[in-house]
Image (cartoon, rainbow, N blue to C red):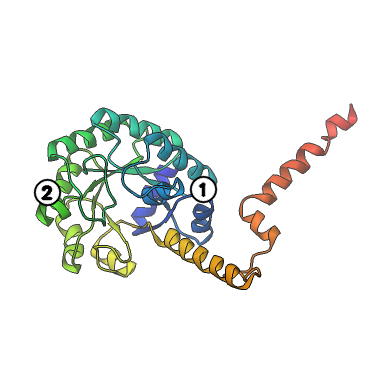
Amino acid sequence: MSRAKSFREAMKRGMVAAPGCYDCITARSIERAGFEAVYMTGAGTAATLGYPDFGLVTLSEMVANAGRIAAAVELPVIADADTGYGNELNAFRTVREFERSGVAGIHIEDQEFPKKCGHLEGKQVIPREDWLAKIRAAAAARRDRDFTIIARTDARAVAGFDEAVVRANAALAAGADMAFVEAPQTAEEVAAVPRLVKGPCLLNVVRGGKTPDLDLREAERMGYKLAIIPALLIKSVVGICDRMLAELKASHCHPPPVTEITVPEMFRRFGADEWDALRDRFRTPAKRDAAE
C-alpha cells in the first residue's frame, strides 16, 4: 500500500494527529512515539535555513526537505506547500515535485506571495477565483489519486469567517480532498468549521496562536479528520537549546540532558543496526563465493 493510500485509510479509522517535524531527527521521533503521520512544517523548514516564515523558501528547498523526511520514516508525510509558488501553472508543477518526493499530500493556501505564517498579522489573500484555479490545477496534476490535496484558506483574518467557509467549500468543489480553514479565532468558530464545510477538515493546533487551545479528542468529536501540531517540537527544541547552553555557560560543565541517551542508543535511532547488518552482509563472503 502506498503511503498516500495508508494516510487515507488512517483517516477512515478516526482523526489523524500529525505533529510537525522540520528534519529527519524530529520526523523519526514522531514515528518512534507512535503517531500515524508526520507533518512537515513550512515555518520549521524555513527556520532550518535561517529564515522566518515569510515566504522566503523556494519550491526546490521545500521539496528537498520533504524528500529527506519521507525517506527517513515509513509514515505518510503531509507537507506545507505554501502558495504553490506562483499561479496555477506553478501549482501544477508543485504537486508533481512533491509527489515525486514521496510525501502523501500537501496543502496550498490562498495568501498573496510572499505569504506569512497564518497566525501573524498583515496577511493578504488573492481573489477567490485565482485560488480555485490553483486548486483545480493541483487536483489535475497528481498521478496517484490517493495523493491528498488540502486547500488552505487564510481568509478568516482578512475577509471574515463566512468568506473562509465559502472558499473552503468552493475548493472542495474544485477538486480538493480536504479543507483547511486557517486560524479560526473562537471556540465557536472551531466547532463550526466541520459543520459548515462540506468535506473533510484539517485543524491547525498552534499554542499561543489565534486559535483557542483544544483537546485533540474534542476536535475529533467535532468532526475534524486531521490535526497538525506544527510548532510543538521546534518550540521545545529551541527552549531546550537555550536552557542547556545557559547551563553550560554558567557552570562550565556538560549539563545533564533532558533524557539520558547513550551514544549507541542515539545511533540506533537513525538506523545503525540496519547499516551494521549491511556491512556484515557485504564483508562476509557468500557460500557460493567460498566454494569457487
In the structure shown, which secondary structural element does the residue marked by tag 2 occupy? Answer: helix
Q: Position of residue 135 (x, y in %)?
A: 23, 37
Q: Nearer the viewer, residue 20 or 135?
A: 20
Indicate which disc residue 186 carries. Answer: none
Q: Disc 1 versus disc 2: distance between alpha carbons?
A: 36 Å
- Classify 232 as above or below 7: below
Q: Is residue 1 visible?
A: no
Q: On the image, numbered disc 1 is attached to which residue?
A: 74
Q: On the image, numbered disc 2 is attached to which residue?
A: 166
Quadrant for the C terminus, please.
Answer: top right
Q: Residues within 10 Å of mark 1 (few under 14, many from 20)?
A: some
Q: Which of the 4 quarters of the picture holds residue 245?
A: bottom right
Q: Which of the 4 quarters of the picture holds residue 151?
A: top left
- Classify 270 as above or below 289: below
Q: Residues within 10 Å of mark 2 (few under 14, many from 20)?
A: some
Residue for point 25% across, 68% down: 212
Q: Position of residue 163 (x, y in %)?
A: 11, 50
- Classify 51 as above or below 227: above
N-terminal-most mark, 1 or 2? 1
Q: Amino acid at mark 2?
A: Val
In the structure shown, which secondary structural element does the residue marked by tag 1 occupy? Answer: loop
Q: Position of residue 226 (x, y in %)?
A: 32, 56
Labelled pair 1, 2 in contact (Cβ < 8 Å): no
Q: Amino acid at mark 1?
A: Glu
Q: Position of residue 205 (x, y in %)?
A: 32, 61
Residue for point 24% across, 64% down: 222
Comparing marks 1 and 2, which lies closer to the viewer? 2
**Left/right of residue 39 with respect to residue 114 in the rendered view:** right
Q: Nearer the viewer, residue 99 or 111?
A: 111
